[in-house]
Structures are given as C-alpha cells and as structure tokens.
Image (cartoon, rainbow, N blue to C red):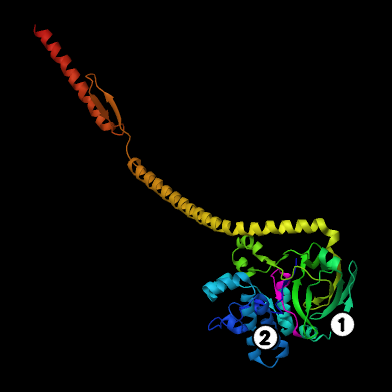
Amino acid sequence: MGGSKIDGGTSSATAAAAPVVNRRDPYEVLNVSKEASDQEIKSAYRKLALKYHPDKNVDNPEASELFKEVAFSYNILSDPDKRRQYDNSGFEAIDADGTDMEIDLSNLGTVNTMFAALFSKLGVPIKTTISANVLEDALSGIITVKPLPLGSSISGKVEKQSAHFYSVTITEEQAKAGIIVRVTSSAQSKFKLLYFEKDNGGGYNLALQEDSEKTGKVTSAGMYFLHFQVYRMDSSVNALAMAKDPEAAFFKRLEGLQPCEVSEIKAGTHIFSVYGDNFFKTASYTIEAVCAATYESSTHKLKDVEQQILRKRTELRQFETEYRKAVAQYQEATNRYTQEKQNVDELLKQRDNIQSSFTANRSVIFGSKDSNGGSNSRDESSPVEDGKDKSAKKRWFNLSLKLSADKKSSS
C-alpha cells in the first residue's frame, strides 16, 4: 500500500550488476554530499538516470555502465537502513545484506524477456523499470490526460512499456479527509500505478510508484494519502537472501514494509498513471479514485495495524538473534546426542563380544560331595575313567570278603 519511492526505472538487479571491485562512493556517483536530504538524492538521481538511460544511449555501452552505477548508488542512498549500513561499514555491509532482482524490459531482447517472464511465473520477485520514453514524455508535458472524477472508475487496456495518464481534482475538504487511488485487474495483468508531481518546467516528475500484486483472483495496486505515515509492503526485499535461508523468509518479511514518501496531497489537480508492465501483452485494468471520508473507520484501523506491524518488526529483529542462538544450541545438543548414542552402542557391543569369548566352546562341569563332605567332580564325557573307578572298587570289595573267609576257616 502507499507508494514506493521513485526509482525512475532503476533496479536492484541492475544494481547488483555494478562492478564488484573499485566501486565509487555512492555520494560521489550522484554528486551529493553526505549530508544530502532524501529530496536532494532523489533529484540528483532523476537527472542522471534519464541522462544515462539505455533507451537514450543504445549505441553507447559506457552510458549503460554509468546507468547501472547510478542505479546501484541510488539503491543504497535512498534506503535509510542501507545508507546507514554503508556510512558505518562501507560496501561490505551492503553486499552481505543482499540485493533485489530487477530488470529493464525496455532494453531486453526477446529471449531474455521470455526468461524474465518464466521467473515471474515461478514466483521469483522481479522488479521492472519504467521506460525512459514515458518518463521523458511526462517531464516534457507531452502526454494525453483523461479526467478521473472522485467516486468514479475507468477501465482500459495499456500496451507494454506504455502508460495511460489520469487527472484527479480534489477540493480542500476532500484533501483534508484523505484520498485513495487504486487499480485492479480481473485479468491478473501486471502493471504499475504511478503518481507524478508538477515540475517547474511545466511537465511532471515521477514521485511514487506501486507495483501490482496478486490479491485473491485479481492483481491490484493502491496509493493512500491519509495525513499519517502510510507504508507499503515490498515483497522483493532480500528475496535472494531468503531463497538461500528459508527461515529468513519469516524474519525478513516485515523488513519489506517501506514508508511512502508522500502521505498527503493538497487541493488541486493531480496526475496518476497506469503503466503496462506485462512481458508480452497489454494490461487490462480499472482505475478509481475515492475520498477516504467514506472509509473513516477503516482508516483508523489501518493506522493502528501498521503501528502494530512496526512494533512487531522491532520485536522480530531481537527475537531472530535469540532464535538463531537457540537453534545453534539445539543443533549442538542434537549432534552430541547422536555421538553419545553411537559411543554407548559401541561400548555395549564390545562388552557382549568379550562375554561371549568366555562361554563359547567350553565343557559343562558338574560337582558333588562325597560322604565325608568333600567335593568330588567328574566329567560325564569321560566314561572310561568312570569305569575304572567301578572295577577298582569291586576288586577291593572282593578282596575284603576273601580275607574275612580265610580267618574264619583257620579258627
């Protein structure tokens, strides 16, 4: 919701394509001071982006590289978090944070456009740039503008990399209540909703843009001018980093909540545009502008919910640190458990093998006590020895009987 900062057709993928080594200071590239305001940075970027845009420099490879460098620099300085990270730690912090993917359709060949369309269908967030021709026509004031009365809607079809312009005129009372401009496409077309500000030269400068997103069975985009800070959700923030770390998809999700630069508009006439962002075909759409007075309760709810989201984002930043630490400790404990289990299993196996060596292939010994209480052992597996004992006992017994008989006869 709301509107993203003007990137004038810049891209994070173009930004990512900037040279990795010997990169120039972003402030130097945009020719602004380190104390430059957001407006100064945006203004400097607009001029350089139009100057070096590939559409205007087809036969100048050097201009294309300069455009990438300008886009990369603006990508850093236009984001408060990235700007702070760069000021503190330089490019290293920016590289670690990852970049979004974005392409310039107006400068792509057919084959590359097909690959871009495939990635988009697979759900990979790909930001697309706005044609320099559209931006220059608006800046020159040579555009056809249709009136869009508040409370009404207009349907149309816009060609790829082309734009339809609409004027919305509001009163003081309506401006005070707040204005909402929204675009939907039942055909699920891909488009951008653009907002232009009046330029001193008589033309219009791009101030905000909102990419369409799928919501239910339609694609939609909206801008909200409600006199308080409105935010939009950029689903492509850290998309590449999240792809590498699925858990980051949760923790980084709220990082995509970006503040809209314009929170209110004054009475008068304002220019909005629907830009065809489809890869191969025209974009079907319906645009409408309404006064927020009829959505007063929803407006209050929006303000409250967004404040809750901001608080939750701060909480998640702290919780992620705690969670990552707990997961690391759990992984360490799990690894130790697996190792200890293996150690115990191995020790018990060794114990069983040792015990088996005592009992395997041994004779069974039986013991008995004699009449005098002594122990008399014999091995049942030795019948010969057992037989000798019996014969010897018998001979001794017969000898005793014979001696007794002889004594009786002599007497």
Q: Which residues are magenta?
A: 119-132
Task: Report the residue at 84% width, 78% height from top.
Answer: 165
Report how far apart the C-alphas of labels 1 and 2 lie in the structure. 26 Å
| Secondary element at tag 2 | helix
Residue 48: assigned label: 2
Against 1, residue 389 (above or below) is above
| Secondary element at tag 1 | loop
Q: Amino acid at mark 1?
A: Thr
- Other-residue count near label 2 (Cα within 10 Å), few / some / many at <14 / 14–19 / ≥20: some
- Is residue 33 or residue 220 the one in the foreground? 33
- Is residue 48 or residue 201 the one in the foreground? 201
Q: Amino acid at mark 2?
A: Leu
Viewed as shown, does residue 77 lie left or right of 371? Answer: right
How many numbered discs?
2
Residue 144: assigned label: 1
- Other-residue count near label 1 (Cα within 10 Å), few / some / many at <14 / 14–19 / ≥20: few
Q: Residue furthest front?
A: 172
